[in-house]
Amino acid sequence: MKSYNAFKNISIIAYVFIFLKGDMIALPFICYLLFSLFDIGTIAQLYSFFALAGLIIILTQTQINKQTFICKILALGLLVLPLIGRLTSVPIELFNYSAFILPSIIFITCQIFSLVLLYKNLKY
């Protein structure tokens, strides 16, 4: 269970440290999510709402059962939605930098490892 929590925490930290390159400075992805919540009427607002709901699901559920496992899988999908939305809204060449690629890869792999460890600890 320790390694599950470690992978979960590393994945959340990596998610927060994904940076989106701007014209003058890079913006942390969590700030992008918070700012786009107030961008009324856009798909980015919907993606931000989903991502923040996914973060809340991952951070609040502590039980180990089948429903929790399914919720965590759905939360991973909710967290990936804004990344995919952002990747499809602008040219892909704008994301070819390590402050986006490395945290994104760390987030996805650690989240998958935590789901595998959670599945191994399921109580039926």
Image: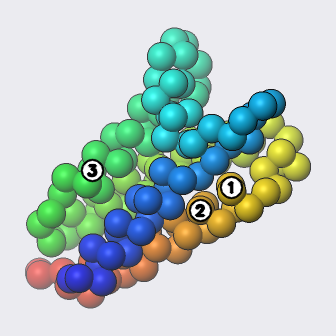
Count of numbered circles in the view: 3
Residue 113 vs residue 95: left or right? left
- Under mark 3, the amino acid is Ile
CB contact under 8 Å: marks 1 and 2: yes
Q: In the rendered structure, which disc, 3 or 2, sits on the residue that comes first in sequence? A: 3
Image position, residue 38 (x, y; %):
48, 16
- Residue visible at 74% across and 41% down in the picture: 21
Frontmost of labels 3 and 1 is 1
Image position, residue 40 (x, y; %):
51, 12
Which residue bears the numbered disc 2?
103
Which residue bears the numbered disc 1?
100
- Residue visible at 35% across and 48% down in the picture: 55
Quadrant showing the N terminus: bottom left
- Under mark 1, the amino acid is Phe
Image position, residue 76 (x, y; %):
43, 57
Which residue bears the numbered disc 3?
57
For disc 1, the neighbor class at 10 Å (few under 14, some 14 to 19, many from 20) is many
CB contact under 8 Å: marks 3 and 1: no
Could you say whether the residue bearing mark 3 is in a helix, strand or loop? Answer: helix
Q: Taking the image as drawn, is residue 89 in sight? A: no
Q: Which quadrant of the view contains residue 41?
A: top right
What's the distance in space between the residues labelled 3 and 2, CA to CA?
Answer: 20 Å
